[in-house]
Image (spheres, rainbow, N blue to C red):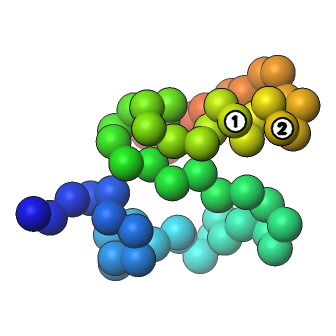
């Protein structure tokens, strides 16, 4: 079964213009929702981040 969220596939590659820095965490999405089945909340807590803004291109 093909999924847009399969790691290490062409459609899941990170756009070169927004490549993360060496020590920057990368959160892998497994579903459309940013929060379900990811390490996002755990990562934010570990980094002491209490606010997050998520934006997307129009």
The local secondary structure at tag 1 comes to: helix
Q: Residues within 10 Å of mark 1 (few under 14, many from 20)?
A: few
Q: Circle 2 is placed at which residue position? A: 46
Q: Is residue 48 visible?
A: yes
The local secondary structure at tag 2 comes to: helix
At a point 51% along the width and 42% down the height, the residue shown is 38
Number of marks drawn: 2
At a point 80% along the width and 30% down the height, the residue shown is 45
Q: Residue furthest right?
A: 48
Q: Circle 1 is placed at which residue position? A: 42
Quadrant containing the N terminus in the rendered view: bottom left
The vertical placement of 54 against 23, above or below, is above
11 vs 47, left or right, is left
Q: Nearer the viewer, residue 39 or 29?
A: 39
Q: Residue 39: give x, y in percent of width and height.
A: 60, 42
Give yes or no for contact between labels 1 and 2 (Cβ–Cβ under 8 Å). Answer: yes
Q: Residue 20: give x, y in percent of width and height.
A: 72, 66
Q: Nearer the viewer, residue 33 or 18?
A: 33
At a point 65% along the width and 31% down the height, the residue shown is 41
Q: Residue 32: give x, y in percent of width and height.
A: 34, 38
Q: Nearer the viewer, residue 55 or 2?
A: 2
23 vs 11, left or right, is right
- Choose top left, top right, bottom left or bottom right for residue 58: top left
Q: CA distance from mark 1 to mark 2?
A: 6 Å
Q: Nearer the viewer, residue 55 or 30?
A: 30
Q: Residues within 10 Å of mark 2 (few under 14, many from 20)?
A: few
> What is the number of the mark on residue 27?
none
Q: Is residue 56 visible?
A: no
């Amino acid at each position: 079964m093909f999924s847009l969220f399969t790691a290490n596939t062409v459609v899941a590659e990170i756009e070169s213009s927004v490549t993360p820095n060496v020590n920057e965490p990368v959160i892998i999405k497994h579903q459309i929702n940013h929060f379900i089945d990811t390490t996002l909340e755990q990562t934010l807590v570990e980094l002491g981040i209490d606010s997050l803004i998520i934006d997307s291109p129009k």
